[in-house]
Image: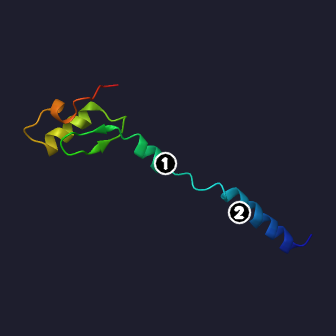
Amino acid sequence: MGNGQKAQMKRDRAAKDKAGGAKSQLKVNEAAKNVQCQVCRQTFLLTIRQRALEEHVENKHTGKDFKSCFPTYVPA
């Protein structure tokens, strides 16, 4: 077996391993966004803390209260 064949076998093996496709989190992250502001419809990840949502209300919706923006939010 010559060096050329070894190199070709290595390329073939690498291509087969790479054929699995990219491992992306984008679809999983989009599915996890199920906390939504009812005023501006901005979505947040499920794991967000209440304090961060309160900051969103203070910064984006002055004059509104927390329950008007996130009526279905239940702290985990």
**Amino acid type, mark 2:** Ala
**Circle 1 sits on which residue?**
25
Q: Position of residue 4 (x, y in %)?
A: 84, 74
Can you say whether 39 is above or below 67 in the image?
Answer: below
Q: What residue lies at 37% left-to-right and 34% top-to-bottom? A: 47
Q: Seen in the image, is 27 located left or right of residue 35? A: right
Identify the image quadrant of the C terminus. Answer: top left
How is the structure coloured here?
rainbow
Q: Quadrant of residue 60?
A: top left
**Circle 2 sits on which residue?**
15
Q: Quadrant of residue 3?
A: bottom right
Instruction: Count neighbours of disc 2 (C-alpha within 10 A) and say few if under 14, some if 14 to 19, many if 20 or more.
Output: few
Furthest residue to the right? 1
Q: What residue lies at 36% left-to-right and 35% top-to-bottom? A: 46
**Helix, strand or loop for disc 2:** helix
**Amino acid type, mark 1:** Gln
Q: CA distance from mark 2 to mark 1?
A: 22 Å
Q: What residue lies at 49% left-to-right and 48% top-to-bottom? A: 25
Q: Earlier in the sequence, mark 2 or mark 1?
A: 2
**Helix, strand or loop for disc 1:** loop
Q: Seen in the image, is 44 located left or right of residue 68? A: right
Q: Quick one: 1 or 45, which is closer to the camera?
A: 45
As drawn, the label of residue 37 is none
